[in-house]
Image (cartoon, helix red, strand yellow):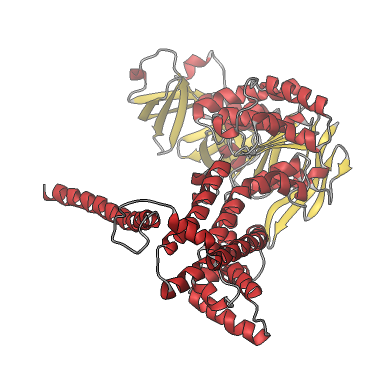
């Protein structure tokens, strides 16, 4: 059952189209990440679901009811603001109780529910504090408790972790996911951070310039990005432009990039005038063809090492091919010496690791 | 090396200037406070040799001063109330809504701050003569509302600007309609600015001379005007006592303000930050 449905939603501000024909739905208990670079229309989409903006065209449905002309307070939507928007003149207790009070819960219910929510976000004992007396992470948890208190149909999170520093962000990401699944909240997370989107979301909706470019489970989108934009936005990638040959009986095509640089790639399921191929750095293995356990149809490249960066768990190697192309290879650090990555280097990757997309021309 | 000497000199110059300023701000006030307690019955040399309250006794038995004080208080209370209410409304409109001519309106609302009070007083005198109004109260009241109104707008506006609009939006997603969101969130947060505006309005009304001088009638005059005219006709230290009393009202108000909302917050523009 879908909790939220957007049907061909378009939003224009004057002559500028912020969102164009967005269609997607959120299932009950699901966490959906709305991902895209800043200015792609994801926040406008969120604000239309919350009721701060009216769609110029199309419909927003919450629990199968059309929300046209319904004010924010006539919808049951929980919204976690990017800067939390806690009421500075109210205590933690009063902040969490505010929605319950406005939705006419009685005294006993309010006290019970507030206690329950503060328990959930592990902030019992902080009831009488003011927001200014809390750390950034604690403020966020109060805001989350406040948004969840009224049992909203859908919870909207606007860049929930962007105001926190990197280390805290990782911790809170896990905590946030636990809290959301504990209450079974149907959630839409708006973010420009692909790691955040992938780790929190059961499903991703990728937006670019007001349009939805792809939606699906995170792994699916990472493995099979449909456009160059999606592939570049989610994860790191090496790009090659070339000429696609006919398919052989294994459904593999030759892909000629340059003189002496021809790859085997899977046959694309679409037609385009020019193609580009993307290979993820972590799918490339250092070593020659003999190290692939006798597998056939392996792409093999050789070149010289330009730069080696040891980033902790990962090692990034930049290799230059004879044809001048540069490749980034990502290897796991398992105690090996960096001396292995010196001078000339050979590497391999399977045709199935090549992602073929239509070139942006 | 030379650079360091110049820096040192600069630092001392700043300290010196501050000390000089403080001295000139405080010293005359201390002189008049001390002189108001002078036991001598004539205007003697500073410092007083003995102290007594007889100038105060004289002040409180002089019906001329008392009438002035009473008028001042009435005018100040009414003018501060009216300009605070009007100022708050104006500030809310200026802060929350966008409309053509908003800039111009804001400038007009704040213009009495830059127009010399003497000009305001004189213009009002002519204007009221044109209307045929010659009674003191309506004229004084109008003048005082005009000069105190900008302070109310100013401080309320400062208070409102600090309130991020997403607080209202947060209240609305939690079930509050626009009116409830205003009373639950915007009003309590802007209250500091409003109270500050009211206090400033009261204080400015209490000690205004320039506007009042033009608008008094023989029966209706404010305390500062009474002091000015006494200075011309009958100069004695009752005026010092009157100044101290006038000062007490303002200082008293500031203390009350500090207790209720905290002075720092008010001077800082009444802006809340989380």
Residue located at (55% from left, 49% from top): B270
Say whether residue B19 is visible. yes
Left/right placement of residue B114 relative to residue B18 reads: right
Say whether residue A32 is visible. no
From the viewer's perspective, is residue B206 above or below residue A221? below
* Position of residue B148 measured from the top left corner of the image (x, y, whole percent): 57, 64
Looking at the rendering, which quadrant does residue A314 occupy? top left
Q: Residue extending furthest left?
A: B1
Quarter holding the N terminus of chain A is: top right
* Position of residue B260 measured from the top left corner of the image (x, y, whole percent): 58, 43
Looking at the rendering, which quadrant does residue B274 occupy? top right
Residue located at (40% from left, 70% from top): B235
Q: Residue extending furthest right?
A: A65
User: Nearest the camera: B35 or A189?
Assistant: B35
Residue located at (60% from left, 56% from top): B198
User: Nearest the camera: B266 or B237?
Assistant: B237
From the viewer's perspective, is residue B261 above or below residue A301? below
Looking at the rendering, which quadrant does residue A328 occupy? top left
* Position of residue A156 measured from the top left corner of the image (x, y, whole percent): 71, 36
User: Nearest the camera: B102 or A309?
Assistant: B102
Q: Residue extending furthest front?
A: B41
Residue located at (53% from left, 26% from top): A168
Number of residue marks: 0
Left/right placement of residue A269 relative to residue A258 reads: right
* Position of residue A29 measured from the top left corner of the image (x, y, whole percent): 78, 27
């Amino acid at each position: 059952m879908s909790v939220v449905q957007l049907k061909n939603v378009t939003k224009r501000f004057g002559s500028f189209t912020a969102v164009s024909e967005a269609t997607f739905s959120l299932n009950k208990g699901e966490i959906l990440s709305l991902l895209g670079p800043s200015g792609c229309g994801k926040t406008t989409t969120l604000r239309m679901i919350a009721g701060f903006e009216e769609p110029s065209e199309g419909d927003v449905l919450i629990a199968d009811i059309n929300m046209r002309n319904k004010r924010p307070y006539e919808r049951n939507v929980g919204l976690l603001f990017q800067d939390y928007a806690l009421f500075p003149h109210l205590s933690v207790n009063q902040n969490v109780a505010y929605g319950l009070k406005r939705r006419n819960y009685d005294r006993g219910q309010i006290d019970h529910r507030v206690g329950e929510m503060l328990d959930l976000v592990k902030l019992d004992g902080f009831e009488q504090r003011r927001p200014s007396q809390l750390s950034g992470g604690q403020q966020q948890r109060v805001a989350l408790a406040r948004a969840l208190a009224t049992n909203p149909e859908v919870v909207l999170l606007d860049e929930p972790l962007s105001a926190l520093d990197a280390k805290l962000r990782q911790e809170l990401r896990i905590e946030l996911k636990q809290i959301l699944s504990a209450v079974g909240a149907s959630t839409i997370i708006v973010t420009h951070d692909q790691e955040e989107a992938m780790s929190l979301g059961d499903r991703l909706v990728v937006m670019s310039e007001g349009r939805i470019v792809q939606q699906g489970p995170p792994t699916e989108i990472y493995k099979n990005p449909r456009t160059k934009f999606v592939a570049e936005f989610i994860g790191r990638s090496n790009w090659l432009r070339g000429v696609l040959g006919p398919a052989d009986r294994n459904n593999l095509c030759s892909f000629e990039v340059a003189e002496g640089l021809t790859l085997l790639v899977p046959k694309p399921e679409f037609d385009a005038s020019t193609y580009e191929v993307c290979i993820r750095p972590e799918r490339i293995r250092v070593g020659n063809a003999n190290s692939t356990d006798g597998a056939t149809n392996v792409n093999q490249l050789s070149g010289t090492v330009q730069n080696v960066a040891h980033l902790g768990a990962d090692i990034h190697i930049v290799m230059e091919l004879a044809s001048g192309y540069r490749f980034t290879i990502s290897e796991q650090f398992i105690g090996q010496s960096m001396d292995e990555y010196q001078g000339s280097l050979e590497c391999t990757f399977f045709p199935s690791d090549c992602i073929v997309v239509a070139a942006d021309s | 090396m030379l650079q360091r000497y110049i820096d040192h000199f600069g630092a001392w110059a700043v300290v010196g200037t501050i000390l000089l300023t403080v001295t000139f701000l405080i010293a005359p006030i201390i002189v008049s406070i001390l002189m108001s307690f002078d036991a001598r019955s004539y205007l003697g040399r500073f410092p007083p040799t003995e102290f007594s309250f007889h100038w105060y006794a004289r002040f409180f038995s002089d019906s001329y001063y008392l009438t002035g004080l009473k008028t001042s208080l009435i005018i100040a209370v009414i003018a501060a109330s009216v300009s605070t209410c009007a100022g708050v409304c104006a500030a809310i409109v200026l802060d929350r809504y966008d409309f053509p001519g908003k800039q111009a309106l804001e400038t007009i609302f704040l213009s009495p701050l830059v127009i010399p009070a003497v000009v305001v007083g004189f213009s009002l005198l002519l204007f009221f003569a044109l209307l045929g109004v010659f009674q003191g109260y309506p004229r004084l009241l109008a003048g005082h509302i005009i000069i105190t109104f900008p302070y109310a707008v100013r401080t309320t506006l400062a208070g409102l600007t600090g309130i991020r609009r997403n607080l209202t939006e947060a209240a609305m997603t939690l079930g509050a309609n626009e009116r409830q969101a205003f009373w639950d969130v915007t009003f309590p947060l802007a209250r500091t600015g409003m109270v500050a505006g009211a206090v400033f309005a009261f204080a400015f009304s209490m000690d205004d001379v320039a506007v009042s001088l033009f608008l008094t009638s023989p029966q209706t005059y404010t305390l500062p005007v009474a002091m000015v005219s006494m200075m011309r006709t009958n100069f004695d230290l009752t005026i010092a006592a009157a100044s101290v009393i006038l000062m007490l009202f303002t200082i008293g108000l500031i203390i009350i303000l500090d207790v209720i909302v905290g002075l720092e917050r008010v001077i800082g523009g009444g802006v809340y930050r989380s």
